[in-house]
Amino acid sequence: MTRIAICGAGGRMGRALIAAVHAAEGVQLSAAIERNGSEFLGQDAGELAGVGRLGVSITDDLAQVDFDVAIDFTAPAATIIHAGVCQRLGRGLVIGTTGLNAEQKAELAALSAEQAMVYSGNYSVGVNVSLKMLELAAKAFGDSVDIDVLEAHHRHKVDAPSGTALMMGEAVASALGRNLDEVAVYARHGHTGARERQQIGFQTLRGGDTVGDHTVFFFGEGERVEVRHVATNRANFATGAVRSARWLASDKTAQTPALYSMQDVLGLS
Ligand SMILES: NC(=O)C1=CN([C@@H]2O[C@H](COP(=O)(O)OP(=O)(O)OC[C@H]3O[C@@H](n4cnc5c(N)ncnc54)[C@H](OP(=O)(O)O)[C@@H]3O)[C@@H](O)[C@H]2O)C=CC1
Ligand SMILES: O=C(O)C1=N[C@H](C(=O)O)C[C@H](O)C1
């Protein structure tokens, strides 16, 4: 039985993760972590997640609890702290937090060179299959189309564009041999001039309770292809993250320290 610690237990994803661990075979919730000073400290994790009492109280220090693999959906600074704890303790970590800056990504790369971790901006199987479809479309169209990414999320989301939109842009850019940092255009306003073919544009919508909606447009002459993924609840992200935790604990590949992706977990890489 793999013992799982959930970091960010009181959040939207944290609660979905507690429910997913509770429902899954071969894993058991052993700890639930929230921010120091959080209103959720001391509460039972199962009751908070709506799955009934689990006998796991929410605490505020990952370094002080028992676990085999941690799952972190918090905020970038907290994720880096939790990655440091997992590296020191020799425990696996599954990370879902988006919006990491370049320095935080480099820290994660260094820590995962010593302790196996999984990072993905999206743990749904559907999005990861979509990434393969995007590669295929990009290779087939080459430079004959204009490509833009449109994403929509709930009003509480703090980072833009979404981690998923960036992964989609990266999949397309790399299939086309483009450097995303050089060709990305984040929204357009004013006298922009005509669009350049090499650009990959990102457009962001925020509102209501939208769980996650991503469309990549391949605009050609006389035709248009749209690859769209719509998440209608958070369970698909949570079950994918729990699947990644089980993979970290049991798959032979994961015994070698590295920063793995959900594509690795699904055998798609
Ligand atoms: N990869 C994927 O598949 C997905 C990724 N995400 C990403 O996951 C992250 C969380 O999303 P969501 O659940 O909606 O956000 P929430 O704000 O609902 O949840 C984040 C939780 O983490 C807590 N937290 C903050 N700092 C710490 C800390 N130091 N220790 C422990 N807990 C902490 C927050 O507490 P407080 O509110 O008190 O600060 C909050 O309860 C985002 O980056 C989001 O983009 C979301 C869905 C899917
Ligand atoms: O914040 C969210 O909610 C989500 N974040 C992830 C992202 O940034 O892509 C994944 C999902 O779309 C939900």
Image (spheres, rainbow, N blue to C red):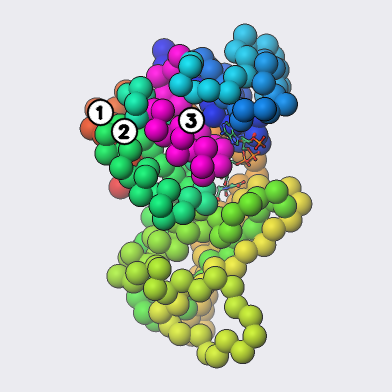
* Residue 45, image x, y percentages: 64, 19
Q: Earlier in the sequence, mark 1 or mark 2?
A: 2
**Which residue type carries mark 2?**
Ala
Label 3 sits on a secondary structure element that is strand
Q: Which residue is mark 2?
A: 116
Q: Which residue is mark 1?
A: 255
**Which residue type carries mark 3?**
Ile
Task: Classify 61 as above or below 79.
Answer: above
Task: Classify 104 as above or below 54.
Answer: below
* Residue 245, image x, y percentages: 42, 28
Q: Earlier in the sequence, mark 3 or mark 1?
A: 3
Relative to 78, is 26 on the left or the right?
Answer: left
Label 1 sits on a secondary structure element that is helix
Looking at the rendering, in which quadrant would you find the N terminus? Answer: top left
Query: Quadrant of residue 84 in the image?
Result: top left
Residue at figure coordinates x 53%, y 90% from the top left: 194
Label 2 sits on a secondary structure element that is loop
Determine which of the numbered discs, if any, sits on residue 139 in the image: none
Q: Magenta segment: does it hold 80?
A: yes
Q: Mark 1 and 2 residues: CB-CB less than 8 Å, in contact?
A: yes
Q: Which residue is mark 3?
A: 71
Viewer-nearest residue: 23 or 151: 151
Residue at figure coordinates x 49%, y 23% from the top left: 62
* Residue 214, image x, y percentages: 57, 58
